Image (cartoon, grey):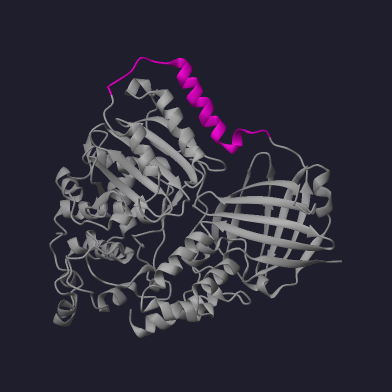
Amino acid sequence: MNLTTASRTFQLLTRILDTQSATEAFLPTAAEKPPLPLRAPLQPFPRATPESQGVSSRLLRRFLEELNRGRDLYMQDVMVLRSGRVICEAAFGSQDLRAAKYTFSACKSVVSLAVGLLADDGLLSVEEPVADIFDESGTLRRRLKDMTVEDLLTMRSGVQFTEAEALTETDWVRRFLSAAPKGEPGEEFAYNSLNTYMLSAIIRRRSGRSLMELLQERLFGPMGITDVRWETCPMGVEKGGWGLYIRPEDLAKLGQLVLDGGLWGGERLLSRRYLEAALRPRAVPPAATGDFNYGYQIWVGRRENTFLFNGMLGQNVLGFLDSGILVVTHAGANTDFQESRYFEIVSRYLGGAFPARLEEDGAARRELEETVRGLSAYSRPPEEADSRAEPFLGRSFASADPRAASTGLLPLALQALGSNYTRGVTSVAVSLKGGTPELVYRERDALHRVPVGLGRPLVSQLDFRGNVYHAAALGRFTHDEEERPVFYIRLAFIETPCVRILKLVLDGEDLLLRQSETPGEPYVFGKLRAAAQSPLYRPLLLLAAGGTEEDYLRYKTRQVLSPEILFRAET
């Protein structure tokens, strides 16, 4: 990190941790998230009974039940396929399998497939020096020390320009190429999403098309993958290492393509030669990341013959190469790599050998179907508001707390990813429409009306400066331990791993708004604490937090992610 980037990163963090003023972003807000429809995919996989594919319905039911019991897993959805047929699919709580889901690092593996397309065409070689691709002078070659495309693919470039620093920079390619590598390229594994971003930029250079244009022509179009969106950097290049919206079933298609050695419907879309190279272990990540080595932007099992597309918080496309089983999941867990218990669970149930088929078991299949229905909150009957809602109705409350200036409805994680920071909440109210409550949440430059389901979630679209999200709201009217009326709302942004929790607590004539989010305080504080161990970051973090101790950093994190705001009743 150079001094300018360090200073800007410090300034941004200071602004975020300042709870009494709205965060001023370095980059302009872009409308990166258009409305994406909730609908079934084109060219869906055929469905089959589990037993017809050699898997027991009872085993799958127990698998789902264990995932659901694991509260630390924050499961959102799961699909299980064998031999290209869906044998089990389930959405948990307010989630919807028709939604195009935000992927973090799981989409790195999709970039690898695009690199393979160019390699197949003879337009790119993994041995090529990066300096040659960008046609720079000998100065760049000396700085990059003959860094190759393969070094980017295997996370061994050594460049330290990272995602956090990119939040304050406009020209990511220039900053990456001008950063001095740490050590020799090709030696040390250091996970960095800007390596993948550079692959996206290389694809544009070599193909003359954007990453999305290439994928649309060669993979997405032939495979019936639609309604996809990939966020771009300020210069218009797809981020590559994160930012892809894609349906679970469409993501499964890309996993099936790898599982089938590059074939789709009998047609070769990608060479087996490239996939074999991509699935060969190239680097050994630290043991703390999990039980996988690293190939070409695809994780490779150390003890099992598996491959993995993996993204933080719990996006996983796990392929068992020997049995032909593919498992696709999304979650919102507090994990970065494969440290979640999920991997032990899925290996225990779906690893190993399976027969070609089993005798059909109608009773077990019906039990599985009933379990799937029970996992979804949409299977429950709707309710109407009762007398417990009355204390909230017909009243509006205006913020009377300076901390309201930094508090908004959109989870902070999504604000930071899109440089889309709130201008601060100014008032809240609750209305009633046909027995259904509606949260009226006003910010300085926006008004959000959120219908809240009682008993069963209600889904609406919320627009945050042109970024439109589907949000499923499920609420209940209750009381706290002091017998104060409480309106509890769980707002799941179903295209993302993020959930916003709101508690409206009536305290006499005043109202307390308590907000939190997942992934939230424990996860973010863990990130900040880890960064604070760095000699470079530690003074910046502690200075930005306004204190000198770790406890104060925790306190500031809690203030930002779990605020409690006082509102006064308006006349």
Would you identify the image quadrant in which residue 463 lies? bottom right
- Count of numbered circles in the view: 0
- The range drawn in magenta is 355-381
- Front residue (pair 85, 290): 290
Would you identify the image quadrant in which residue 569 lies? bottom right
Residue at 84% in and 49% down: 390
Would you place residue 284 above or below residue 235 in this image? above
Q: Along the horizontal axis of the image, is 351 left or right of 505?
A: left
Confirm whether the magenta stretch covers residue 414.
Answer: no
Would you place residue 396 above or below residue 28 in this image? above
Quadrant assignment for the C terminus: bottom right
- Where in the figure is residue 485, as x and y percent of width and height? 79, 52
- Front residue (pair 316, 483): 483
- Where in the figure is residue 136, as x and y percent of width and height? 18, 77
Q: Residue furthest bottom?
A: 3
Characterize the magenta stretch by its predominant secondary structure.
helix
Quadrant assignment for the N terminus: bottom left
Would you place residue 196 above or below residue 317 in this image? below
Residue at 35% in and 14% down: 359
Residue at 51% in and 46% down: 37
- Where in the figure is residue 135, as x and y percent of width and height? 18, 74
Residue 362 visible at all: yes
Confirm whether the magenta stretch covers residue 362.
Answer: yes
Q: Along the horizontal axis of the image, is 511 left or right of 269?
A: right
- Front residue (pair 80, 256): 80
Q: Along the horizontal axis of the image, is 566 left or right of 269?
A: right
Would you identify the image quadrant in which residue 540 lies? bottom left
Residue 247 visible at all: no
Q: Residue furthest right?
A: 571
